[in-house]
Image (tube, rainbow, N blue to C red):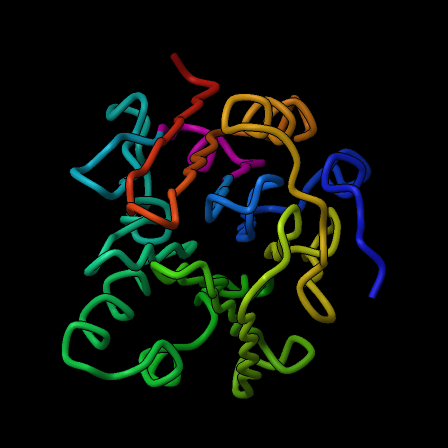
Amino acid sequence: MELLCLKKELEQNAYPGRGIVIGKSEDGKHGVIAYFIMGRSENSRNRVFVADGEGLRTEAFDPAKLEDPSLIIYAPVRVLEGSNIVTNGDQTDTVYDFMREGKTFADALRTRTFEPDGPNWTPRISGVLAPNGDYRLSILKSDDGRPEGCRRYFYEYTSPAAGEGHLIHTYRENGNPIPSFEGEPKRVKVVGDIDSFTGLVWNALNADNKVSLFTRFVELSTGHTETRIVNKNK
């Protein structure tokens, strides 16, 4: 599979929706995570990322403008015994609870389905970065727009190469309804330190639609983390 340019993949898509990148830094010393959200409606754009202990939560930037919080207010990132769980919805909590009980990432997501926001039926995308740098990704999506059918896909990456990662996002492109992501997660280059990586991702996202970005570098030898949060709303 071709190693794609992350910057180009993001720049050429005006509305990938929400996205996850997990991989390994160029120097091979860090596990890397990025999670971004975008929005077309006022409700979706009225958000910020806020640190919550080792994890992350979304908040309304202007509480007075908050409409339906059910699909936009959640904890995208939680940490369990050194494993970083990142998702685009409240399935973060499902994965966290199952793993805490000794069950698996896949066990948790087999109890969930795509978001109930027809006619888009937005996919649920999820990932886990293990303390040793291995990682998993998943997408739960409708069966070609059929709300009664759910397709669950799971991907596992062991001993990832330095400077490589995988990108998965909710939407293939902009549209009405918005078409879901198709195919396997995209194999992309991971370049730079945390600040240059954060800048690359943020600057590549569509200026009108981007809302917030979270990035994290996890030092594989020690578990030490560095985190960056960027919000369009300030």
Rendered residue at 68%/57% (across/down): 177
Rendered residue at 71%/45% (across/down): 189
Q: Residue furthest top?
A: 234
Task: Residue 13: name its quadrant.
Answer: top right
Q: Is residue 101 above or below residue 63?
A: below
Q: Residue furthest front?
A: 221
Rendered residue at 22%/77% (across/down): 98
x, y percentage for residue 151? Answer: 57, 83
| Left or right of 2 in this view: 19 | left
| Magenta span of residues | 37-48
Query: Is 39 part of what is drawn in magenta?
Result: yes
Rendered residue at 16%/72% (across/down): 100
Task: State which quarter of the image contains the N terminus.
Answer: bottom right
Q: Nearer the viewer, residue 61 or 190?
A: 190
Q: Nearer the viewer, residue 225 or 169?
A: 225
Task: State which quarter of the image contains the C terminus.
Answer: top left
